[in-house]
């Protein structure tokens, strides 16, 4: 029974994070909406990753890899969150890398779990689902780095 409630929390946090991530990315970079949405995104990633780690340990033999994706995803989010808070030298690129890296990891986890159910991905090797978010995300991070510097 408690697993159902935990699943609802996990799905709600993940879906909100997936919606909020791009919104925060494309808003004006100043105090206000971007800062509040980025803070909320960070906490949603924490909830998603924490509950995901619990679920992966419950079905370890089948979903062990999600435990490690959750660690990587939250590590990226924390890196980006702290970079923005501390504003040390080169903080903006670190912030971009961390926040977008966490988003890539979250999308990877979703595709890894659901790829065989998705019309496009079920036609290919599971590796396509694993590699597509990174193949799309890294060029976007590089583009965001260039725009941040210019």
Image: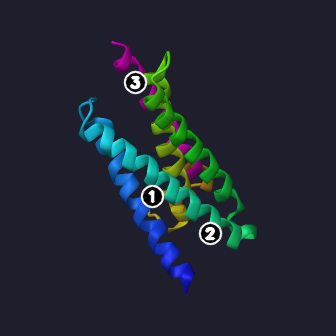
Point 51% across, 38% down: residue: 101
Viewer-nearest of labels 1 and 2?
Answer: 2
Give the residue at the far front of this rendering: 86
Q: Which residue is mark 1?
A: 120
Dividing the image into 4 quarters, which one contains the C terminus?
top left
Question: Could you say where residue 4 lies in the image, as x and y percent from the top left?
Answer: 51, 81
Which dot marks residue 143?
3
Residue 120 coordinates in the image, percent (x, y): 45, 58
Is 20 included in the stretch rendered in magenta? no
Q: Are marks 3 and 1 in contact (CB under 8 Å)?
A: no
Q: Is residue 56 above or below residue 144?
A: below
Tell me what residue is drawn at x 44 percent, y 31 percent: 85
**Part of the protein shown in magenta:** 129-150
Query: Can you tell which mark lies on residue 55?
Result: 2
Q: Residues within 10 Å of mark 1 (few under 14, many from 20)?
A: few
Q: Tell me, for residue 2, which label it has, or none.
A: none
Q: Determine the image quadrant of residue 144.
A: top left
- Label 3, secondary structure: give it: helix
Which of 144/58 is in front?
58
Question: Is residue 61 shown to the viewer in this render?
Answer: yes
Residue 23, quarter of the rendered image: top left
Distance from Cα at disc 1 to Cα at disc 2? 26 Å
Could you say whether the residue bearing mark 1 is in a helix, strand or loop? loop
- Location of residue 3 in the rendering, given as x and y in whole percent from the top left corner: 56, 79
Q: CA distance from mark 3 to mark 2?
A: 35 Å
* Residue at disc 2, secondary structure: helix
The answer to whether the residues at label 1 and label 2 have Cβ atoms under 8 Å apart is: no
């Amino acid at each position: 029974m408690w697993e159902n409630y935990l699943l609802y929390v996990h799905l709600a946090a993940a879906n909100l994070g997936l919606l909020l991530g791009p919104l925060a990315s494309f808003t004006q970079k100043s105090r206000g909406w971007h800062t509040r949405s980025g803070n909320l995104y960070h906490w949603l990633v924490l909830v998603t990753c924490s509950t995901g780690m619990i679920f992966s340990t419950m079905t370890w033999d089948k979903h062990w890899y999600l435990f490690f994706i959750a660690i990587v995803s939250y590590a990226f989010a924390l890196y980006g969150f702290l970079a923005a808070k501390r504003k040390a030298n080169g903080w903006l690129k670190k912030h971009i890398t961390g926040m977008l890296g966490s988003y890539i990891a979250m999308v990877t986890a979703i595709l890894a779990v659901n790829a065989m159910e998705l019309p496009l991905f079920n036609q290919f090797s599971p590796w396509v689902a694993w590699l597509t978010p990174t193949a799309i995300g890294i060029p976007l991070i590089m583009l965001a780095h260039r725009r941040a510097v210019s």
